Image: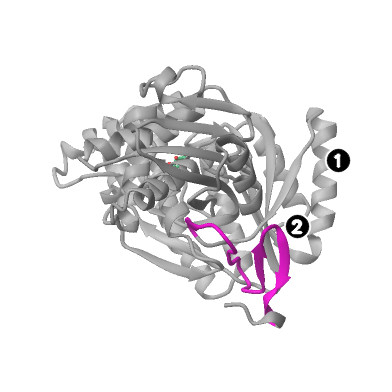
Amino acid sequence: MDKPTISAAFSACFAAAPALVVRAPGRINLIGEHTDYNGGLVLPAAIDKAIWLAATPRNDGRFVFFAADLAEYFDSDTDGMGLQASKKWANYLLGVISEARRDGLALGGMNLAFGGDIPLGAGLSSSAALESGMAYALDHLNALGLGKMDLVRLAQRGENNFVGMQCGIMDMFASVMGKAGQVLRLDCRDLAFEYFPFQSEDYCLLLLDSGVKHQLVDSEYNTRRSECEAGVEALRRHAPGIGALRDVSLDMLARHAADLPPVVQRRCRYVVEEMARVEAACAALQAGDFEALGGIMYAGHAGLDAQYEVCVAETNFLVEQARRLGAAGARQMGGGFGGCTINLLKKKDLDMVTEKMSAAYKQAFGLGLVAYPVRIADGVEEGGGWKVEGGGWKVEGGTYVLCHFLGCP
Ligand code: GLA
């Protein structure tokens, strides 16, 4: 998908050119999983896979959406503006509208076509990308004058309050705030953030999509969140100042272990350790020590598996194989129960690892493995060209142009 393709889909649907085209990227997360809703640290980045939205305002207050990849329509006149059971994709758009209205923002209607290349259910936050892109489109078409943080909040509230998934803020934050070639160290307690360059001559990132999409992911996610809250509740009896697991140390957990059911102990321990791993990963990045960073990723995966219990046999297998093939690091990424693993490996090993992993995965599970080498890209923006890490490439209308030679910004 690119600007010309989504513009053409829009024109075919609505018999006019779009007034606005938005590129809203998916995200990766190097480390810091399930820490965002515990007031902790995360290390995500926006990527060169995105949802593209083409839109034009309507003056009759009606919302008409076209999901280009599914060839499905939504029309507020016939479908209403409530939660959609059959067109689940529409809920992500309606949630953002509903929250904008709740803020008293004056919205006109809209014709919208969207589509993209973020694989669904792979842990790359296609829904957050759609929500962030919608927030951006509403802002621009209605001249609301919102700031980037307002877009992040609208997108998250749409998901929490309308779709009903109690996700943290990481995904939307990365989709909106991402910068080419940089990962974001975000403190989810006060939303302070810093960019860290992720650039290496030798190492690259590879996503391996297990193809496993767990039906229970949303309910299990909400359960994990309640377990963490139960831990905080119990510890607060000893230390009333605790607001979230961010304020809890391993020491404190050990001292009050008797007050926490074993499962809550495991969840809390994982989160506290994972927050320390983000700090350690930032230090490794600053030192340019990618092998150390990789070791932290493996440790994160072990915690996700044994303590947080959100891994599946397929992703465990992929991480073990990555280790066997000499990858610096690998771990399951995102909410859990399948989706992608993120692998940090030497560029020279990329083809070898992809081939061997695919063969081993097929043999073990009878499943095809889709591999996505990813690059770190800019956050949500009006469509056109966009930058990716390395600064060497700019994409215009699907054609790759080498900027080094042409002097693009
Ligand atoms: C999902 C959620 C995020 C975050 C991750 C786990 O992607 O949407 O907010 O909690 O899971 O780190």
Horizontal and vertical percent position of residue 96:
36, 38
Q: Is residue 384 magenta?
A: yes
Q: Which mark is residue 326?
A: 2
**Cα distance between the residues tagged 1 and 2:** 16 Å
Residue drawn at x 83%, y 39% is: 360
Would you identify the image quadrant in which residue 375 lies? bottom right
- Percent from the top left, x then y, of residue 163? 39, 28
Residue type, mark 1 in image: Ala
Disc 1 beta carbon < 8 A from ligand 1? Answer: no
Magenta range is 379-404
Say if residue 25 shows up in the picture.
Answer: yes
Give whichever of 113, 23 is nearer the camera: 113
- Left or right placement of residue 46 versus residue 138 in this view: right
Residue 74: say if magenta.
no
Residue in front for this viewpoint, 148 or 79? 79
Q: Residue at x 60, y 68 (%)?
A: 389
Q: Element at badge 2?
A: loop
